[in-house]
Amino acid sequence: MKCRACRGPAVIDLPAHNANFCVEHFLAFCRDQVSKAITKHEMLRPDERVLVAVSGGKDSLALWDLLVDLGYQADGFVIGLGIGEYSDASTGFARAYAEQRGLTLLETSLRDDHGFDIPTAAKATRRVPCSACGLSKRHLFDRAALDGGYDAVATGHNLDDEAAVLFGNTLRWSTEYLARQRPVLPARDGFPRKIKPLIRLGEREMAAYCVLRGIDYIVEECPMAAGNKHLRYKEALNAIEAESPGSKHAFYHEFLARAVDRFADGAPAAGEDGHLGACERCGAPSTNEVCAFCLLVERTASAVPVSLGETRWARR
Amino acid sequence: MKVLLRNPRRELEVEGPVRVDTLLQRLEIDRGSVLVIRNRELVPGDAELADDDEVEVRPVISGGA
């Protein structure tokens, strides 16, 4: 296999792009794709400060690396989720990356700073762990960005993530979610701007980027995410992609180009779907007197901490 | 050669030499959902793996959204 750019030995094939690349040109390709996404969707200006939501996984560490490489002022923020050894290891990778690169990593811990962890929250609320996890992350990333005066929060959602979410939303015709599934959500009513600069790159590219850049990340899957719907949607889309390379890119990017505005036309505008006030406990924007995160803190306050027991991660 | 698989983590002994894409076919693994790493270096589908190589087949799909 030869590199499309220089005809030297290739290290990776990208069927969706009908291309193979050597190390140098693959890294340049990744930078170009992120740069294109940022420019096309007006995600960030060169002088703006961005807070990267870091998990210790491949996507968020690659994103942080790419943003810094492109010259953005990017700090990281990691949340200790309390998912046993898995969370400890994940946070460890984030710390190691920041230390090696001399970058600023902000940290918070659900258990130490808010009195609960994800396994306990899942049991107390009787909902899937990903629900409490997503809620906590959104709340804490928003708060950290606003407290730190950052212009935007960047998340490592890649093309595979966005295509899988779009697939799920389309299967159920969840029009309100479809209307909001954009790579940039502007700042409004106490929420910071949210951006997804990896929407032109798949997770295989992100994993390869980390390997080639010498970025160590947590390879093991979250023990609480195993078998979730999102993973099944990804497997279904990967089966289609194997037969028809480029399908995921077309599915998501043609949705942005041709369909998302049609859903937005029928969706309630910001503020119309309920009065947005401030949470009486933490001040975060909320349609209720107490925001969902503070309610979660309250519901878990008296819960007995859940031990994860032996997980796939612990058995490694 | 030693082949490390993940999720769950396990090790296989596979006789070399063998091409990367042939190895993945034998293991019934979709090429698009993994990276193959030899001695800490990424290798493409047409690379030949030798008997004394240490190989990792690393999954790339993650569940968070």
Image (cartoon, coloured by chain):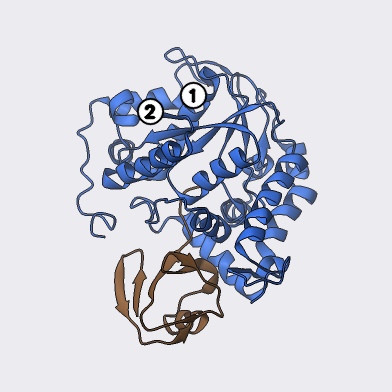
- Residue A164, compared with residue A140, is above or below; it is below
Residue B4, how many percent across, how many down? 35, 70
- Neighbours of disc 2 within 10 Å: few (<14), some (14-19), many (20+): some
Q: Chain of mark 2?
A: A
Q: Earlier in the sequence, mark 1 or mark 2?
A: 2
Q: Secondary structure at mark 1?
A: helix
Q: Which residue is mark 1?
A: A144
Where disc 2 sits, the SS reads strand
- Look at the picture and state if B49 lies above or below A269: below
Q: Nearer the viewer, residue A218 or A299?
A: A218
How far apart marks 1 and 2 lie (CA) works out to: 9 Å
**Which chain is blue in the picture?**
A
CB atoms at circles 1 and 2 under 8 Å apart? Answer: yes
Which chain is rendered brown in the image? B
Q: Indicate the position of residue B52 as horizontal and vertical percent values.
A: 35, 80
Quadrant assignment for the C terminus of chain A: bottom left
* Residue at the right extreme, as displayed: A258
Q: Amino acid at mark 1?
A: Ala
Residue A36 shown left or right of residue A61 in the figure: right
Residue appearing at x 42%, y 50% in the figure: A217
